[in-house]
Amino acid sequence: MEYIKVKGIVCKITEYKESDKILTVLTYEKGKMQIVAKGVKKKGAALAHAARLFYCGEFECVCQNNMPILTGAAMIQDFFGLTKKIETLYYASHFMDLCSYFIQEEQPSNEIMSLLLNTLYLLMRDEGDPMLLTTIIQFRLSAIEGAAPVTDFCVECQKPLDDDCSFCFSIENDGISCCNNGTCISHAVFQAINHICNSDSTKIYFFSIPKSDLCVIFELSCRYIEKIAGKHFEILDSIKEIL
């Protein structure tokens, strides 16, 4: 019988049988996992606290017929404050949806997990504009996946980019163009995209951008991550309705 201990966060809950739930957990060690939480719908169940969306902790499991069964859980970070406001819940749910798409089963996911939990923490603490946090996680995910937009030369003429260039962002060609093809962007947007994608992971949140540019870079990040993923993230529609 195999015993497993992983650190992660519950991103989805599925009702299962009369008193059980199946938890979809994003983990550092084993990527995306399905864990059966037996009896957690019963009153006074010892592990009911772990069968909640956004529960972040250490999960202990025993494998039965190749299915992990939850045997213990200890909280690491309380993220339940994310559910107090509908706006924050939308953003947090989108972050989870994004990372759940890119994190694969049985694949260690340290970089994406750290990005997710750090961004959720800043969102919950109201330490950063939610639109900017969304922009950061979306462009950084593209970089982690090896698909960061090109920012060091023009994606059309291959000319090195410098401060004398005028910039456009080309979704079609995956990066910055100086040939007036794509969405025109300011130098501040160009520098922000370059910073998010190429800076050390400990520094990606430490920059500012004019409010006049925030909607532009947010929309570009949404379009770009959906191109990279090859899918539409539906929660973005709800987010855009409340902006």
Image (cartoon, grey):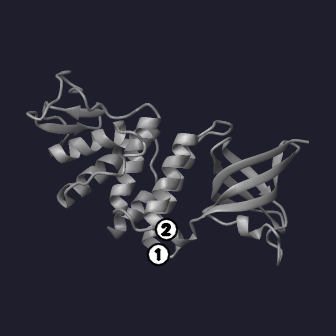
Q: Is residue 74 above or below residue 100?
A: below
Give the residue number, with chain letter if any, for mark 2: 89
Depth check, front residue: 18 or 185:
185
Q: Amino acid at mark 1?
A: Lys
- Give the class, few, some or many, for how many residues have Cα within 10 Å of label 2's Cα (few <14, many ≥20): some
Percent position of residue 165, x then y: 10, 33
Q: Residue furthest top?
A: 158
Percent position of residue 69, x then y: 83, 53
Percent position of residue 118, x then y: 48, 54
Residue 198 falls in image quadrant: top left
Q: Residue at x 23, y 54 (%)?
A: 209
The Cα atoms of the two marked residues, 1 and 2, are separated by: 6 Å
Image check: 10 left or right of 196? right
Do labels 1 and 2 touch, CB within 8 Å?
yes
Q: Residue at x 44, y 63 (%)?
A: 123
Give the residue number, with chain letter if any, for mark 1: 85
Depth check, front residue: 220 or 118:
118
